[in-house]
Image (tube, grey):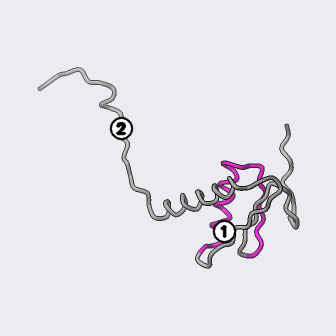
């Protein structure tokens, strides 16, 4: 038997570095492309994101909403057919607008 003084670092779980799955890689790539497009977005300018036939509208809409929530909450979004429009201005044809934030 051996008795010794142990350090607390020995008890801490070691982080596992895991490779990203193809789905996670695709999601990160989509978000990065959308974030770059938002970086080019100027005041009252409209950017149209036209989807490829392989891309699904709900998936891309969710990706755009996620980037809006994390990086540009002042951006409005509209979906018309297979095209997603984003702008800092109010987009026409919306059923209801987002109420302005207090403050």
Closer-to-camera residue (100/38):
38
Residue drawn at 46 percent across, 64 percent down: 22
Q: Secondary structure at mark 1?
A: helix
Magenta span of residues:
55-81
Q: Nearer the viewer, mark 2 or mark 1?
A: 1
On screen, residue 50 versus residue 26, left or right, reads right
Kindly check if marks 2 and 1 are in contact, taking CB atoms under 8 A apart as contact.
no
| Farthest bottom residue in view | 53
On screen, residue 2 versus residue 74, left or right, reads left
Residue neighbourhood size for the residue with mark 2, other residues' Cα within 10 Å, grouped as few (<14), some (14–19), many (≥20): few
Q: Which residue is mark 1?
A: 58
| Farthest top residue in view | 5
Above or below residue 80? Residue 64 is: above
Q: Position of residue 59 (x, y in %)?
A: 62, 67
Q: Position of residue 81 (x, y in %)?
A: 75, 76
Nearer-N-terminus badge (2/1): 2
Q: Position of residue 64 (x, y in %)?
A: 67, 60
For the N terminus, give its image quadrant: top left
Q: Is residue 38 magenta?
A: no
Q: Is residue 78 magenta?
A: yes
Q: Which residue is mark 2?
A: 13
| Farthest left residue in view | 1
Q: Secondary structure at mark 2?
A: loop
For the C terminus, give its image quadrant: top right
How much space separates mark 2 and mark 1, taking CA atoms?
Answer: 38 Å
Residue drawn at 62 percent across, 79 percent down: 53
Label annotation for residue 12: none
Q: Position of residue 26 (x, y in %)?
A: 52, 64
Residue neighbourhood size for the residue with mark 1, other residues' Cα within 10 Å, grouped as few (<14), some (14–19), many (≥20): few
Q: Quadrant of residue 32?
A: bottom right
């Amino acid at each position: 038997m051996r008795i010794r003084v142990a350090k607390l670092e020995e008890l801490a779980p070691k982080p596992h570095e895991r490779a990203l799955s193809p789905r996670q890689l695709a999601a990160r790539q989509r978000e990065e492309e959308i974030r770059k497009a938002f970086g080019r977005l100027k005041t009252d300018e409209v950017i149209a994101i036209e989807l490829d036939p392989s891309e699904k509208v709900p998936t891309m809409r969710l990706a755009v909403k996620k980037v809006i929530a994390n990086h540009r909450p002042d951006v409005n979004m509209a979906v018309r057919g297979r095209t997603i429009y984003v702008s800092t201005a109010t987009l026409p044809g919306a059923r209801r607008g987002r109420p302005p934030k207090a403050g």
